[in-house]
Image (cartoon, rainbow, N blue to C red):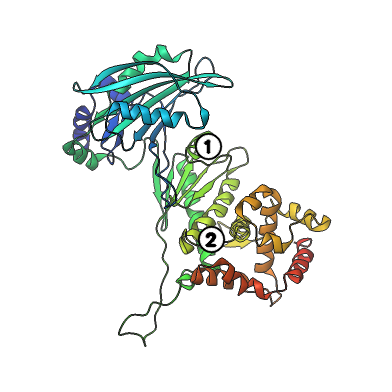
């Protein structure tokens, strides 16, 4: 039934020749009720979900799809396309004005050279705009088509060298003219057959994770196995039930034992096959230069399969980032875990080693960080613990190499020391933080009861022996 229905629905959705339909796969956005045919053989890069924070203003121009050409143009300019929704606009003039305003933020030029109206679906007027955007290395060309059905507006842009883009107008007009506003009947039909992921992507489901991937499936399965295994380790250190907050009293049952259990939502892991694909996605999300990251607003852990340093590096980075994901699930976005402990515990699990034979983890020294902190302990270049415990995220990241190593070493010392006065201090702090949501109060009632100068001396003596 699905094989018969799909061509019929696509025939409704796209007014383009059948041979082109056979080569390319359409982009269909049922949430926004649109569809378009991208250029043949271009790679569709997943688009990050919009971050949802109360303090974060909603983007007026929001990218909802992105494609990359197989190669750069003859001038070595990247060639790509983006599809954007333009919010709070209902006509073409308003859409162009909003899009142009977005393009010229920060003093950037968007020099419109030509524009022309055209028709889609034989009845709706659209408009394309040709513009140049100067840069230090030359000038990019933008060919942007604007679409509106009187209720919603969208912009589909192509970019490449400004010297070459005008010659591509006849080719890309075919893609513009394939743009379709879907009616309710088409949306309902497509909802029954549309695959949940983009072309080239699959999903591997484990007990707690959805591993979305376009890397080799064997690696995605391996990541899923390790995620489940490391999750059990997180739960040993920070059990879900112990982080349920204050007991919930139920009227009429005050004398009965009560609990407030914390549970985990399913968590998403997105694994790219290459660093280039990962970086393209990460940059779209405002993350630059990372090897992997966790986005709390999107509940999404993103990485890629390293090739130059082997798969083990990817796995260990996932241990680090998944710890952030787990802590966010426990505490939520309203609780701020001190940066030294948040990153320190993530680096603590980075050093974990999983045995495929026994199915067990062993947590040892972090081989990536240990030499840095040993040297700092010897020459006195470490951050005094009284300062480290109060560091902001900006302060911590400004000296990331040292601070990551030191945060790991303090966490590792506190978890492994046999000195009874330090045992349990991290767990106690975390529980108090979860219950009070007050970082200063939780610190004063846990770490604040220690002699920090003595802790620093004991930690420093231990570091050189790790």
The tally of labels here is 2
Q: Residue at x 32, y 29 (%)?
A: 94
In the displayed structure, 25 sits above or below 428; it is above
Q: Disc 2, disc 1: CB below 8 Å? A: no
Q: Nearer the viewer, residue 119 or 406?
A: 119
Image coordinates for residue 39, horizontal then vertical, percent: 37, 23
Give the number of the disc on residue 279.
Answer: 1
From the image, which quarter does the C terminus lie in? Answer: bottom right
Residue 214 placement, left or right of 403: left
Is residue 1 visible in the rendered structure shown here? no
User: Around disc 2, counting alpha carbons within 10 Å, would you say few (fewer than 14), some (14 to 19), or many (20 or more)?
Assistant: some
Is residue 398 visible in the rendered structure shown here? yes
Give the number of the disc on residue 336.
Answer: 2
User: Around disc 1, counting alpha carbons within 10 Å, would you say few (fewer than 14), some (14 to 19), or many (20 or more)?
Assistant: many
Image coordinates for residue 55, horizontal then vertical, percent: 44, 51
In the displayed structure, 343 sits above or below 181; it is below
Give the number of the disc on residue 338.
Answer: none
Q: Nearer the viewer, residue 148 or 253?
A: 148
Q: Residue at x 28, y 32 (%)?
A: 35
Q: Residue at x 79, y 60 (%)?
A: 464
Pick whichever of labels 2 and 1 is earlier in the sequence. 1
From the image, which quarter does the N terminus lie in? Answer: top left
Quarter of the image holding residue 19? top left
Q: Nearer the viewer, residue 111 or 219?
A: 111
Q: Secondary structure at mark 1?
A: helix
Residue 191 placement, left or right of 81: left
């Amino acid at each position: 039934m699905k094989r018969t229905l799909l061509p019929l629905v696509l025939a409704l959705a796209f007014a383009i020749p059948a041979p082109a339909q056979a080569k390319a796969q359409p982009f269909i956005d049922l949430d926004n009720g649109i569809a378009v045919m991208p250029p043949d053989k271009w790679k569709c890069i997943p688009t990050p979900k919009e971050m949802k924070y109360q303090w974060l203003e909603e983007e007026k121009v929001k990218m909802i799809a992105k494609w990359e050409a197989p190669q750069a143009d003859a001038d070595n300019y990247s060639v790509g396309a983006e599809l954007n929704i333009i919010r709070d606009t209902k006509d073409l003039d308003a859409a162009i004005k909003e899009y142009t305003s977005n393009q010229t933020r920060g003093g950037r030029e968007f020099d419109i050279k030509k524009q022309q109206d055209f028709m889609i679906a034989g009845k709706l007027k659209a408009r394309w705009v040709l513009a140049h955007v100067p840069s230090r290395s030359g000038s990019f060309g933008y060919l942007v088509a604007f679409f509106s059905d009187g209720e919603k507006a969208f912009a589909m842009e192509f970019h490449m060298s400004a010297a070459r883009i005008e010659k591509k107008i006849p080719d890309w007009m075919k893609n513009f003219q394939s743009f379709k506003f879907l009616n309710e009947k088409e949306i309902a039909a497509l909802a029954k057959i549309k695959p949940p992921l983009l072309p080239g992507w699959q999903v591997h489901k484990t007990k707690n994770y959805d591993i979305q991937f376009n890397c080799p499936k064997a690696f995605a399965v391996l990541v899923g196995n390790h995620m489940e295994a490391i999750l059990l380790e997180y739960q040993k250190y920070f059990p879900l039930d112990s982080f349920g907050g204050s007991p919930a009293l139920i009227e009429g049952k005050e004398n009965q034992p009560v609990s407030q259990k914390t549970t985990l939502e399913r968590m998403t892991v997105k694994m790219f096959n290459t660093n280039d694909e990962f970086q393209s996605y990460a940059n779209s999300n405002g993350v630059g230069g990372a090897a992997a990251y966790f986005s709390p607003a999107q509940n999404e852990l993103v990485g890629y399969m390293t090739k130059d340093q082997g798969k083990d590096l990817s796995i260990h980075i996932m241990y680090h980032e998944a710890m952030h994901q787990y802590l966010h699930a426990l505490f939520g976005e309203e609780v701020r875990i001190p940066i030294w402990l948040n990153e320190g515990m993530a680096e603590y699990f980075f050093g974990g080693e999983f045995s495929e034979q026994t199915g067990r983890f062993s947590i040892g020294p972090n081989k990536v960080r240990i030499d840095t902190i040993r040297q700092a302990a010897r020459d006195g270049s470490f951050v005094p613990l009284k300062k480290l415990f109060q560091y902001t995220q900006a302060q911590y990241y400004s000296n990331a190499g040292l601070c990551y190593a030191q945060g790991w070493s303090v966490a590792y010392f506190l978890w492994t020391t046999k000195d009874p006065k330090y045992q349990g201090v991290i767990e106690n702090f975390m529980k108090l933080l979860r219950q009070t949501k007050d970082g200063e109060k939780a610190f004063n009632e846990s770490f604040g009861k220690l002699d920090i100068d003595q802790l620093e001396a004991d930690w420093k003596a231990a570091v050189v022996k790790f």
